[in-house]
Amino acid sequence: MRSRNVLTGMLLGAGSVAGTLLFRRRLARQRERVDVYFGDGSMVSLTKPDEAEPLLRRARQILELAS
Amino acid sequence: MDAAAALERLRDISSQVRAAVIFERGGKVVGSTLADAERAKRVAQEAEELLAAAEQRRDATDDGGKFAQLEAAVQGGSVFVVRDGDRLIAATTPPEPTVGLVFYDLKSCLRELETTAPKKRAPAKRKPATRTKKTDAKP
C-alpha cells in the first residue's frame, strides 16, 4: 500500500515537472520576436512564426557564431 | 576614437553586451570584440542579411523612414543591429535585456566612432586689415 502511494507521488511529481518544462518552453517560444524600428519613428513587430522565422533563424546563427 | 577603443568602451559601459561587430554596408568589418576575424566577418554578413530581410517587411507602399535598428529575441538571447549612417553595429546579449539601454549604448558607440572620422576644416578667413588712428597722441 505504502509503495503504491510513493509511486503515485513520484508519478505526480514527474508529471508536474514535465508540465512546467513544457509550459516554460512554450512561453519562451511565444516570446521570440523581431522588432524593427525605422528612422521615421515607426516600428514593426514580427511575432507570427511564418513571418518572423526567417529572421529568427539568422539571429540564432549570429548568436551561435558570437558565442 | 578608433573601432577597438569604441568597442572597449562599449564593453565597459554595457554589462549586457556579450559580443559586438562594427561593419559597413557590404560586410566590411571595421572592428569586433570577437577574437576570430573569420567569425566576425560571418556575423557581419548574417547581420546584413538579417537587416535586408527586415527592410523587406516594411510595407512597399509606405515610403517612411529607412531602417534604424532592430532587436531579434530568441531563446538563447537577443541580437541587436543598429545603423548610424553607413556604419552598422551588430551585438548579442543574454535573454531579456534592457532593450532601450542596449540600443542607446550601441548608438553611442557608433557615434563615438563617427566623431573621430577626419573632417576637412575650411581655411580660416582672415580679417581684413584695418588701420586705426592713434588717439593717444599728446596735444
Image: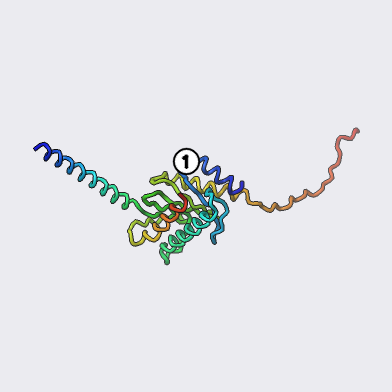
User: For the C terminus of chain B, which image quadrant?
Assistant: top right
Colour pattern of the rendering: rainbow
| Frontmost residue, B57 versus B22 | B22
Image coordinates for residue B19, horizontal then vertical, percent: 49, 48
Asked whether the viewer can see residue B86, the reply is no
The answer to whether residue A38 is above or below residue B18 is below
Q: Quadrant of residue A55?
A: bottom left
Q: Amino acid at mark 1?
A: Ser
A65 on left or right of B138: left
| Residue under numbered circle 1 | B15
Residue located farthest toward the left when viewing the structure as drawn: A1
The residue under the point 45% across, 51% down is B80
The residue most toward the bottom is: B61
Q: Is residue A48 left or right of residue B26?
A: left
Q: Is residue A50 above or below residue B5?
A: below
Q: Position of residue B123 (x, y in %)?
A: 74, 52
Image spot of residue A39 (x, y percent) = 48, 56
What subunit carries mark 1? B
Q: How many marks?
A: 1
What is the x, y in percent for residue B57? 41, 62
Up the image or down, A30 lies above or below B8; here it is below
Instruction: Work out whether residue A7 or residue B79 is closer to the camera in this orientation and state it.
Output: A7
Q: Which image quarter: residue B134?
A: top right
Q: Secondary structure at mark 1?
A: loop
